[in-house]
Image: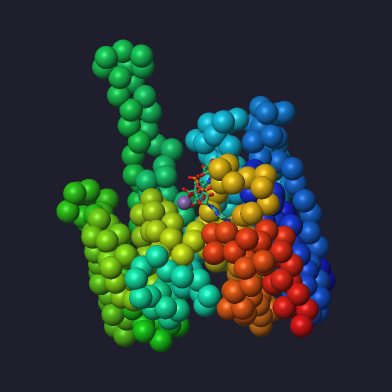
């Protein structure tokens, strides 16, 4: 039976990297005999908003809930629609309504890419950020008072539920369990954020009791960001709240040379709802329309999607093809962010070609 994939390219470079993601997925599907059926949706983009006054149709949930996975590009075009409207009206709704409470973001220095951190080579940076993806600092609890007056107040609460914290911690501990180093780092800020963050720490300590073989440490987010740069080799699985995970998952990939290669999986582990696979980066208005965006973040997200659907071998083959093309270092093929003069298409084509063998 075909696996039904909903495709939403979104805005800016989302529409440029998506065809490459699909190209490589189709090559992998052919080689590994996987039946993928893609259905493209126009909603979830700022152009759709300009036409309809909303980012998604009212029945988006029913339209998408039966798919096996969502393959997403990037959304946001602040000159057309304010970011909080476009993002809260699309991506953040998917994450919340489909209960994709894990945002899994691998961060790996790939062969052929130069890290901006002196002397770092592949193998030195290889960790996962596990980001809480449905609550925390991204809450809709709050409001405005006395608007337009000198007394104006804005409030936005951080929400941590025991279920919400425990389930992301459990996922992260389980992931650490599968890794050779068996190490988990928790991102906290319990010195300054005096209610929610000590609670997060308490739940980590409680969960750690069930995983005696995992080495657990924690850092306040400020020094943790410094340590990402100074000692990226210390990290194996890093778990954080929604906002901390967001920040760490741009910083980590930047340490690996470019955020253009970083993938992510927004997962509903129970499989009750479809999971969503998208690059970490956004719509990059500064380079959109030039055909120079790196498609690897999109392609690698596609590999995570295949693995999620049960095709680990095919997902691994996609990552190996990415590594092989990066290692070759052909500047006519590689995009500018990784030192080449090639295009989105030349890089996508080369990776697809590798898979075809
Ligand atoms: P961004 O990730 O779009 O871009 C940051 C920088 O990285 C830019 O200089 C850009 O050119 C570069 N970059 C990003 N992806 C690249 C790629 N594949 N290849 C080469 N270079 C790449 O972040 P931003 O500028 O903060 O946000 C732009 C828009 O995207 C905003 O509307 C923002 O809200 C949105 N956004 C969406 C997502 C998402 O859909 N998941 C994620 C982040 C930002
Ligand atoms: C990401 C993005 C989103 C987030 C934005 C665009 C709402 O930065 O996927 O990392 O903050 O989660
Ligand atoms: Mn982000």
Tell whether 307 sits left or right of 137: right
User: On screen, 321 above or below 219?
Assistant: below
Q: Name above or below for residue 74 compared with residue 188.
A: above
Above or below — where is 218 with respect to 159?
below
Quarter of the picture containing the N terminus is bottom right
**Where does residue 82 sit, x and y in percent of width and height?**
53, 31
Name the residue at the left extreme: 191
285 lies above or below 321: above
Residue at 37 percent of width and 33 percent of height: 142
Q: Nearer the viewer, residue 315 or 99?
A: 315
Left or right of residue 125: residue 210: left
Can I make out residue 85 in this image? Answer: no
Residue 244, x across and y down, in percent: 36, 54
Q: Position of residue 336 (x, y in %)?
A: 57, 59
Image quadrant where residue 214 sits: bottom left
Task: Say whether residue 110 is visible.
Answer: yes
Q: Nearer the viewer, residue 122 or 47?
A: 122
Q: At 71% across and 29% down in the image, what residue appears?
A: 52
Residue found 64% across the figure and 36% down from its top: 46
Q: Position of residue 75 (x, y in %)?
A: 60, 44
Quadrant showing the C terminus: bottom right
């Amino acid at each position: 039976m075909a696996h039904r994939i909903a495709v939403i390219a979104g805005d800016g470079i989302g529409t440029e990297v998506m065809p490459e993601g699909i190209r490589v997925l189709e090559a992998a599907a052919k080689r590994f005999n996987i039946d993928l059926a893609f259905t493209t949706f126009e909603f979830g983009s700022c152009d759709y908003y300009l036409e309809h006054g909303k980012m998604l149709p009212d029945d988006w949930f029913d339209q998408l809930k039966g798919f096996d996975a969502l393959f997403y590009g990037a959304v946001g075009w602040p000159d057309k629609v304010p970011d909080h409207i476009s993002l809260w009206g699309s991506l953040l709704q998917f994450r919340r309504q489909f209960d994709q409470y894990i945002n899994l973001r691998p961060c790996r220095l790939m062969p052929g890419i130069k890290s901006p951190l002196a002397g770092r080579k592949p193998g030195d940076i290889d960790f996962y950020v596990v980001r809480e993806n449905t609550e925390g600092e991204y809450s809709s609890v709050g409001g405005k008072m006395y608007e337009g007056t000198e007394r104006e107040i804005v409030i936005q609460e951080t929400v941590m539920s025991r279920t919400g914290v425990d389930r992301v911690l459990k996922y992260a501990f389980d992931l650490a369990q599968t890794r050779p180093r068996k190490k988990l780092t928790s991102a906290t800020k319990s010195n300054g954020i005096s209610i929610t963050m000590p609670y997060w720490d308490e739940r980590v300590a409680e969960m750690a009791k069930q995983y005696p073989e995992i080495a657990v440490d924690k850092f306040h987010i400020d020094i943790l960001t410094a340590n990402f740069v100074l000692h990226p080799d210390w990290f194996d699985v890093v778990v954080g709240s929604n906002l901390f995970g967001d920040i760490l998952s741009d910083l980590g990939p930047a340490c690996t040379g470019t955020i253009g290669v970083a993938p992510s999986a927004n997962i509903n582990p129970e499989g009750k709802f479809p999971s969503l696979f998208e690059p970490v980066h956004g719509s990059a208005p500064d380079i959109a329309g030039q055909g120079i965006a790196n498609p690897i973040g999109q392609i690698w997200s596609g590999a995570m999607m295949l693995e999620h659907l049960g095709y680990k071998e095919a997902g691994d083959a996609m990552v190996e093809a990415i590594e092989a093309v990066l290692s070759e270092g052909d500047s006519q093929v590689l995009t500018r962010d990784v030192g080449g003069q090639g295009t989105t298409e030349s890089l996508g084509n080369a990776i697809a070609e590798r898979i075809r063998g």
